[in-house]
Amino acid sequence: MSGPNYEQQPQADYSTQSYAEYQESLKQNAVFASDRKPEKKQKKSGGNRNKIIAIAAMVIVIGGAIGFNSVWDSEMDEKVQDGITDGISGAIDEGSNRINELNASTDGELALIAAREALEQGHYSESELAEYLTSPYGEVYTDQAAQYALDNIDADWNAEALESAESYLRHSHYSYEGLHHQLSAESADNFTDAQARYAVDNVEADWDAEAVEAAESYWSNDNIDITPDELRDILVSDTIGRFTDQQADHALAELGIS
């Protein structure tokens, strides 16, 4: 009995061929794999680089935006703060001015009412009315309120001067110049010279009769002991009677003491 013939076993050849083929396939796969790896690495490397560039760009953009926003916010904060501060200050100033104007307007209206009442009860020049409104013995308004009243009151100062002249002549005896002095003197009515002149030019008066009545008031006064010449001097005096010479002589003649 002979032993088995291994060389004729197809397995041996299949096994050898399979190994060879296996080795060859490994080589081919290795070559194929080596050919593909660089391509994959290149793609992967390119993708990472692009991602890195994109990320870097985003960082730059975001950083720049943050930096710009920080500067912008800082500048805007200052501008906003300045604007708010200026706005508040302006509002406070405007509010204070409005309050002052309102108070001044209210005081002015009250002063105007007081001025109208004063003119209804008496006769005032513009200066005398202003003094009355601001005097501690009068209404005690501020100068501003008094000026508001004078600017807005509907007054005819010539008419006021004329009414004052008529009032003086009803209660006493005046010459033409004596009445003018009384109306225009700062210590008296304080009308302007033109207003006082208007009054004495338009008042109904008999200056000769005024001289007679003035002379009689002096001559009949038991407390005054004067001569006719002294009486005449009083009548024509520049500081007392201010009558003319003719008016004084007429008065003495009427009294029968010339």
Image (tube, rainbow, N blue to C red):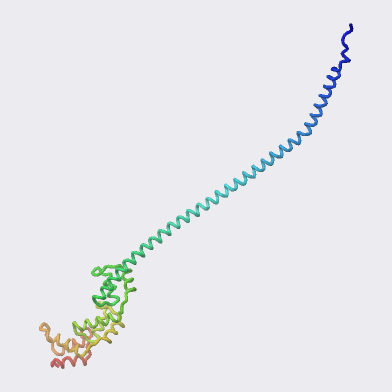
Residue 209 screen position, x and y as percent: 19, 89
Residue at the left extreme, as displayed: 222
Q: Which residue is pictured at 84% across the width and 20% down the height?
A: 14
- Judge left or right: residue 36 versus residue 81: right
50 or 216: which is nearer to us? 50
Q: Quadrant of residue 126?
A: bottom left
- Judge left or right: residue 2 versus residue 209: right
Q: Quadrant of residue 246?
A: bottom left
Q: Which residue is pictured at 77% across the width and 34% down the height?
A: 36
253 or 160: which is nearer to us? 160
Residue 121 screen position, x and y as percent: 23, 75
Q: What is the tally of numbered marks visible in this picture?
A: 0
- Judge left or right: residue 4 versus residue 132: right
29 or 196: which is nearer to us? 29
Quick check: 26 above or below 126?
above
Quarter of the image containing the N terminus? top right
Quarter of the image containing the C terminus? bottom left
Residue 18 screen position, x and y as percent: 83, 22
Q: Which residue is pictured at 31% across the width and 77% down the height?
A: 155
Residue at the front extreme, as displayed: 1
- Judge left or right: residue 146 versus residue 173: right
Residue 235 screen position, x and y as percent: 19, 87
Q: Quadrant of residue 112?
A: bottom left
Quick check: 26 above or below 110?
above
